[in-house]
Image (cartoon, helix red, strand yellow):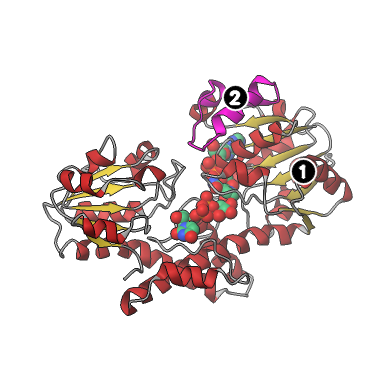
Amino acid sequence: MRIAMIGGGYVGLVSGACFAEFGVDVAVVEVDPTRLAALREGRMPIYEPGLEDLVKSNVAAGRLTFGADIAEAMNGAEAVFIAVGTPTRRGDGHADLSYVYAAAEQVARAMTGYAVIVTKSTVPVGTGRRIAEIVSATRPDLEFDVASNPEFLREGNAIGDFMKPDRVVIGATSERARATMQRLYAPIAATEAPILFTGIETAELTKYAGNAFLAMKVTFINEMADLCERTGADVLEVARGIGLDARIGARFLQPGPGFGGSCFPKDTLALVRIAQEAGAPSRLVETVVAVNDARKSGMAARIITLCGGAIRGKTIAILGLTFKPETDDMRDSPAIPIVARLAEDGAHVRVYDPEGMDAARPLLPPSISYCRDAHDAAKDADALVLITEWNQFRALSPTRLATEMKGRTLIDLRNVYDPAAMRQAGFTYHGIGRP
Ligand code: NAD
Ligand code: UDX
């Protein structure tokens, strides 16, 4: 079987490499010359654990290729996946579908025979239909089907999520499209992951509903954390206490500085707009967006208060910049508004992130100092703030930190550290939602 993958980013590259691993011939098309050059030289344009080895072995086996020419990639392809970005459109919060529609038109021009055109990008309800119209208008002669196959992988665990998913959702209307997708996903079906065949609109909405529900869960526990801080309860125990209820489930109940990343923020916002336009507004999701935005922009104020109210001239060490560990992705990271505000209020901000510093530079103020490691960042700091829970920060010795830092304020926005051990080492420790 042969497929084309339009877009060699987090989703296109991971899913392309995983399909290749399952024995499919995959031609990835990437329009960005820097990304394409990197891929052709065997360098990964993104940091994702395990990806480099997976890509290299499948390139060596001849099953995975990278190019800029859609026609070449489409040659003999039974399915073509559109895995381009759908960022928030400037001004109105809608998903920007210009990359998707441009790709659909390019695909239509390049097609030589029947293929299934599959959206892997997260797209609003109705996009599949619009793609069908674009393709028919561009090439009235073509025989094709449109399908929706939203991707549920998480960054940092993308390969595992793709290869062993909780489920696969495929929206398709024709038997021919369903049969093609079924063959493609046969290796995953063999792992007993449910493959759900639905209508196209249902598949499109399922993706937004899934992300919005998870974002709501995170936002709920963040609110409970605030309540714990006012009442003396411990949010970790509350999360455990409710998470053991099988109807609730333990995952996505870790309080923090607010959700970020390339999906939750833009997808909740897009769902708000989709629902408003459809005349069925979702007040829950609207509230999730507002509460999370306020949390992210208010996090710096919390830090400033915990630093004594004024930070001008103080040195603040920041551990972790990416929106979550095991990725270099800085999109909508809570670190962006936090660092910006601390710098604006006159702090010397010393940051360290294991993978995200290159991506962070253009997004953070120029006055920031980028450090070699956590200890370098902590040097002479009045306060240390952990924003992203990278494993390498978990076992930092409090006694060593105490010798490196000037002050003794430790603000742990991910509840990674043992408060008692930190207090014993002389730190004033502040977690999230813990007494
Ligand atoms: P990304 O920005 O990392 O990658 C998109 C890539 O497509 C870029 O490299 C871009 O240069 C390329 N591209 C754009 N137009 C092209 C064209 N016409 N031809 C060839 N290449 C083209 O984005 P991403 O994070 O991979 O997300 C892609 C889609 O998948 C989005 O809709 C996103 O919501 C969805 N998604 C992302 C994740 C995630 O964790 N990142 C998870 C699930 C779903
Ligand atoms: C998310 C979805 O989980 C995935 O299914 C979808 O395909 C893409 O969007 P991702 O953005 O990679 O994946 O990371 P995720 O692990 O979901 O975390 C998103 C944000 O929520 C991060 O900022 C993370 O720190 C935060 N989060 C997550 C919490 O604050 N607490 C939690 O318990 C879980």
Residue 190 lies in quadrant: top right
- The vertical placement of 205 against 131, above or below, is below
Residue 14 lies in quadrant: top right
| Region rendered in magenta | 37-66
**Is 194 positioned to the left or the right of 317 in the image?**
right
Across and down, in percent, residue 241 comes to 50, 72
Residue 49 magenta-highlighted: yes
Which residue position holds label 2?
Answer: 56
- The vertical placement of 316 against 289, above or below, is above
Residue 188 lies in quadrant: top right
Which residue position holds label 1?
Answer: 185
Q: Residue furthest right?
A: 175
Say which of 310 and 268 sits in front.
310
Say which of 409 and 95 sits in front.
409
Residue ID at (77%, 40%): 187
Say which of 419 and 347 sits in front.
419
Using a 10 Å C-alpha cutoff, classify the residue at mark 2 as few (fewer than 14 neighbours), some (14 to 19) or many (20 or more).
some
